């Protein structure tokens, strides 16, 4: 039994010295407060075991007595340092902090004030027994705080962090039992001493696994989250077809990987692609931010994550990089899709334009061709008056063709969204009078222009010209005189209306009034026209971020109202 206890003691000394070295190395690497407290606690424990191996069984003299008290003081400080580590993530109440501090200071003073420290096997005075009881209460109280905090904090953490925290919790419990058992064992070579040394060995191994588990062990602990993460990466690389879908597929596994209670994913423009519960900005909780080309991750982790989940936090960079690649892939796909749609739209517009031009130009071209043939073949048989009529008819048909071509070109530009809007300040009254003079021609007397309120507006004059020309032409062609063109500048828009005194628009075509080839008036079958004017007018209005609508006149007639914004376009 003596050899077993001795061997276990040597192994324990080695393990706890290694623990001290690992903790110090970790602190030097991280330089954070929690790592510092942990390094001090294990350094104290390593010194305790070293002194215990070197100290004689019956120390005498001032120097050895001082070293013995220093060793006992390290035993007093070890649970306190562990307590500071466990409470460094989430601070305890001030009352508990005060009680623990006073207990530790009082016990430290008492340690150096002891008259003597009995050796193993010697009788223990009542004063020393009281000190020993206080020592056990202090150690047990602090150990219980450490055990409880680390065990509870492991809830909701990812597998690696949870197991590491609970390993430290178990190790603290085992060491506490070993310390209590050592005070109750008088024979250092008994079975009880072997049990105490075995508990200390178990505690040391658990401390090592909690503090610095081997990579192979971490990988086995991380298997559940790793499997889910691999599935998410496979999905975002093969199945995700939109940027939002990429973000949603990776968000849950990322949060689970680091035990994050909240997470958010942005693209490079700062747009939120996906998120799960995010704390209010007033909470003052800062997220861990990971930035990689094409993506930004914000994760709100627990306070324990930076210490126990450092590997997982590093994995976030890998996941973010892969997400950025997936987002780039989706972005390229979307761009290709948009280019394909744009090409299809261009082909459709070209086909429609050719069909429209062929349909509308057929009649005037046939008419002109017939008139030219008549002049060529029968010109010498026609009277001069008949030739004049043919020439006038040719002029009218060519003018109609020119107007039709201009309308077709307008439609082509509007369909292709190639109309550039250039607002500028203009005098509405003067502009409308000029447009009406050209559009009405010989019927100028049938049209009246009226501007209410301010006459200055900031709009595109060419678009106003196109719209008003079409509306006045329609009013004179399909309606009846008089025609009123009125305008008012109201707040941020200019409202122009064109109203005639005719019978109005037939009710059966009101819904299709602004579609191509719809003729506006009841006399549409008896009056020439292409049925494109209103479609063009509305398209110009909408290109100007406005609109054109139809209203029934009171008591009769047709009223067309165009509204154009006068601000925000320059």
Image (cartoon, grey):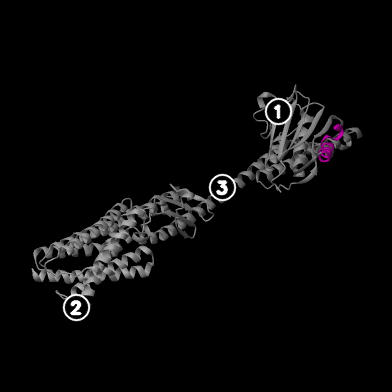
Q: Alpha carbon of mark 1 to alpha carbon of mark 3: how far?
A: 36 Å
Residue at figure coordinates x 9%, y 70% from the top left? 2
Front-most of residues 122 and 194: 122
Q: Which one is closest to the eye, mark 1 or mark 3?
A: 1
Q: Which residue is mark 3?
A: 341
Name, please, the residue furthest toward the right. Answer: 384
Q: Which residues are magenta?
A: 429-444
Label ID, residue 61 = 2
| Residue 218, quarter of picture | bottom left
Identify the secondary structure beneath mark 3.
helix
Q: Nearer the viewer, mark 2 or mark 1?
A: 2
The label on residue 475 is: none
Q: Report which residue position mark 1 lands on.
A: 551
Q: Is residue 19 visible?
A: no
Relative vertical location of residue 165 with respect to residue 496 in this rendering, above or below: below
Percent x, y of residue 396 = 82, 36
Given this view, does label 3 or label 2 mark the residue nearer the observer? 2
**Residue 518: x, y in percent?**
69, 31
Check disc 2 and report its element: helix, strand or loop: loop
Disc on the earlier residue, 1 or 3 = 3
């Amino acid at each position: 039994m003596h050899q077993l206890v001795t061997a276990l003691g040597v192994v324990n000394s080695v393990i706890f010295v290694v623990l001290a070295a690992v903790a110090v190395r970790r602190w030097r690497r991280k330089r954070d407060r929690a790592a510092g407290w942990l390094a001090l606690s294990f350094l104290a424990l390593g010194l305790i075991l070293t002194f215990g191996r070197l100290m004689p069984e019956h120390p005498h003299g001032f120097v050895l007595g001082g070293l013995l008290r220093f060793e006992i003081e390290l035993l007093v400080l070890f649970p306190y340092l562990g307590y500071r580590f466990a409470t460094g993530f989430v601070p305890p109440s001030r009352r508990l902090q005060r009680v623990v501090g006073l207990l530790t200071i009082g016990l430290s003073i008492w340690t150096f004030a002891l008259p003597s420290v009995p050796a193993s096997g010697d009788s223990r005075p009542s004063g020393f027994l009281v000190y020993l009881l206080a020592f056990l209460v202090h150690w047990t109280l602090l150990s219980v705080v450490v055990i409880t905090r680390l065990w509870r904090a492991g809830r909701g953490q990812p597998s690696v962090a949870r197991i590491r925290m609970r390993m430290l919790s178990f190790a603290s419990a085992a060491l506490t039992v070993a310390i209590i058992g050592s005070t109750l064992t008088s024979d250092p070579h008994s079975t009880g001493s072997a049990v105490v040394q075995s508990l200390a060995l178990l505690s040391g191994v658990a401390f090592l696994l909690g503090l610095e588990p081997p990579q192979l062990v971490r990988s086995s602990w991380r298997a559940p989250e790793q499997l889910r993460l691999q599935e998410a990466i496979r999905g975002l690389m093969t199945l995700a077809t939109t940027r939002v879908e990429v973000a949603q597929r990776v968000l849950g596994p990322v949060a689970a990987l680091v035990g994050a209670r909240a997470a958010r994913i942005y693209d490079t423009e700062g747009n939120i692609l996906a998120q799960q519960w995010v704390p209010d900005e007033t909470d003052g909780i800062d997220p861990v931010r990971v930035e990689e080309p094409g993506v930004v991750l914000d994760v709100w982790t627990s306070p324990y994550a930076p210490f126990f989940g450092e590997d997982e936090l590093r994995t976030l960079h890998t996941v973010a990089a892969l997400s950025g690649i997936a987002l780039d892939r989706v972005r390229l796909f979307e761009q290709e899709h948009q280019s394909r749609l744009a090409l299809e739209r261009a082909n459709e517009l070209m086909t429609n334009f050719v069909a429209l031009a062929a349909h509308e130009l057929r009649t005037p071209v046939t008419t002109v061709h017939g008139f030219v043939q008549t002049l060529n073949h029968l010109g010498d048989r026609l009277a001069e008056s008949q030739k004049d009529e043919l020439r006038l008819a040719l002029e009218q048909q060519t003018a109609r063709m020119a107007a039709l071509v201009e309308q077709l070109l307008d439609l082509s530009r509007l369909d292709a969204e190639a109309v550039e809007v250039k607002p500028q300040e203009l005098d509405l009254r003067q502009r409308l009078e000029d447009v009406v003079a050209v559009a009405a021609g010989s019927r100028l007397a049938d049209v009246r222009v009226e501007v209410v309120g301010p006459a200055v507006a900031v709009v595109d004059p060419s678009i106003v010209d196109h719209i008003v020309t079409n509306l006045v032409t329609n009013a004179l062609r399909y309606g009846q005189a008089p025609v009123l063109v009125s305008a008012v500048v109201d707040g941020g828009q200019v409202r122009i209306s064109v109203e005639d005194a005719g019978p109005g628009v037939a009710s059966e075509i009101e819904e299709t009034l602004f579609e191509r080839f719809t003729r506006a008036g009841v006399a549409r079958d008896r009056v020439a026209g292409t049925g494109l004017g209103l479609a063009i007018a509305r398209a110009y209005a909408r290109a100007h971020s406005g609109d054109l609508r139809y209203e029934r006149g009171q008591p009769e007639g047709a009223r067309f109202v165009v509204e154009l914004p006068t601000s925000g376009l320059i």
